[in-house]
Amino acid sequence: MNNNLNALNAPRWQTQSIYKSTKSQDFMNDLAEMRSLQTELCDFFGKSEVSTSFPQWLASFLPKYNRIYALATNLYAYVSVLYMVDTTNAEFINNISTIDEEIAKIDQIDVKFKSLFAQKYAENSRFLEDFYTSFPQYRNYEFLFEEILLFSAHQMSAEKEELASLLNLSGANSFSRLQEQIISNLKDEKSGKTFNEIRNEAYSADRETRKNAFNAEIALLESSKIPLAACLNGIKGTTITLNKQRNWQSALDKALAQSRLSQKTLNALIGTIEKSLPMWQEYLKTKAQLLLGKDTLAFYDIFAPLAPKTGENTAKVWSFEETKNYIIEKFNSFSEDFGNFAKNAFEQNWIDAEIRPGKVGGGCCLEFPLAKESRILTNYTGTFSDVTTIAHELGHAYHFECLKNLDHQLTRYPMTLAETASIFAETILTKDMIKNSSGFERAKIIEIHLQDCCQVLVDILSRFYFEKSVFEKRQTGELTAEDFCALMEDAQQRTYGKALDTKHPYMWALKSHYYSPYLDFYNFPYAFGQLFSAGLYAQYVKQGAGFAQTYKNMLLDTGRLSCEEVCKKAGFDIQTEEFWLSGIESMKEELEELKAFAKS
């Protein structure tokens, strides 16, 4: 790591409060309990209550069902945090494989349970009312039980599901990890920089630095294009095969069900983003004029910071201590609860922000249901974008904080609503920075916010187009790296248009979202979260401090209702373009201010 990054004092996380190590007694005890529960739950299916009193059986089954998944989530998150900061460590890779195998067995119990539940419902749908009457504490499971019935209609036989799960361990899961390992260990021999360090130079104020980093990034990805294309072919091919067996019309249909979102809502969301594309292309043109004095940008200019017209670079570099204090202060202005939570996360070293070889790129938040804590990974370089990234991940962590005392099954919310919480947290900081600045500094923060929104709406739309086209093409055979590049460039052309004169054909190779074996279309939930959080922030401005409790109540509902129902309770109809367009309005106002600054 270079000296400039060292000076930021970006920390490493501590994991001792979760487990001492994978060989410690506490870890081994939880692993043993999880395995014991596997046997116990398998035996449950032979109990006489299955036939004589299914409501009573269900009430006995659910606490153990919650417990085993809480254990599995805790153990898997722990081995993941070890692996994510040291991806070449053979022991850490093997730990993930071990827990993966255990989870595959638990998932077979899950398949059997949901099949049995659907069978009992088909025999007598009234059993649920009897269940709620006798065990009213489970009334909150009503939506989850409806979801079980939906997914049971898309389930193979127990034998096939077990085989698919086992084959995934050495198939799609391995391809996913291989992509992470390739990307996290790429290194430019000429500069000696890791791939993540090169990626971070996209934020440099010097255009030649950005261009050289972009070319180095493309060259590194191109050098690994064959194994990366094989990984993506393997994962998407597996998905297509299994979706056919499970009677899903398409991967998108399954993704919508997993997101607890209707096709009508998605159509309204995508339609709104498409209608806003001319506005975003105008934003990119405005940035090009401010940055370069011309009408188009190269892809490597997208994240470039604005500089005063004198040419002097005054971009503030945030030390990690400054970031910590600022986030705590601003979260506290929203609610004391949120501020105290952030303070605790920093003080307890929940955040790994240091850039180092072997560490995965990007940012993420992992949750530990037994420890009732979270851990946040990011790669910190001191830009304001890095500050908002930490706020984003703390938003995820606060979401879990609100849910952590519920039954584990009620804490599992869809990506759509997860991104709402994180982007709302970002918005608190961004709006404050805009409000308390003027002149060039204000224009710079507005541009950063528009840049982030452009990524979450325009670039995400290009990724949505790309993934749809990949699934369509993959139906008839494998794709080459060149095929993937062509599809990516086409998707970027459809969204960025003439605003970019240079595209990024290898974006498919580096985005880990495409390599998830279990969640396709890992893209539109971000756009959902961006626009929905804009609506929530507008409500906060209107309601003031009282909104914090409304917000917390909404987060509590995210594990037990559909997106439409959660949003309806918060006062929004998300099935219309009118709602989503309202989220664009504040961005339009910011663009007009940026355009006025460009002309001044």
Image (tube, rainbow, N blue to C red):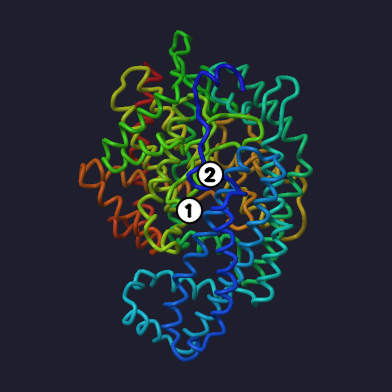
Image position, residue 172 (x, y; %): 70, 56
Residue at x 74% of width, y 20% of height? 190
Which corner quadrant holds the N terminus? top right
Instruction: Judge from the rendering whether residue 270 lies leftward or rightward of residue 329; answer left or right.
Output: right
Instruction: Judge from the rendering whether residue 320 lies leftward or rightward of residue 379; answer left or right.
Output: left
Q: Quadrant of residue 218?
A: top right
Image position, residue 269 (x, y; %): 44, 52
Image position, residue 133 (x, y; %): 31, 81
Find disc 2 in the rendering and name its residue. Answer: 460
Nearer-the-camera pick, 288 or 95: 95
| Badge number at residue 415 | 1
| Amino acid type, residue under disc 2 in the picture | Ile
Above or below: residue 135 compared with residue 531: below
| Amino acid type, residue under disc 1 in the picture | Met
Above or below: residue 160 compared with residue 411: below
- Considering the numbered disc 2 on the image, is that residue within a helix, a strand or a loop? helix
Instruction: Judge from the rendering whether residue 513 lies leftward or rightward of residue 227; answer left or right.
Output: left
Marks 2 and 1, how far apart in space? 14 Å
Nearer-the-camera pick, 263 or 61: 61
Number of other residues with Cα within 10 Å of mark 1, as a class: few under 14, some 14 to 19, many 20 or more: many
Instruction: Judge from the rendering whether residue 369 lies leftward or rightward of residue 109; answer left or right.
Output: left
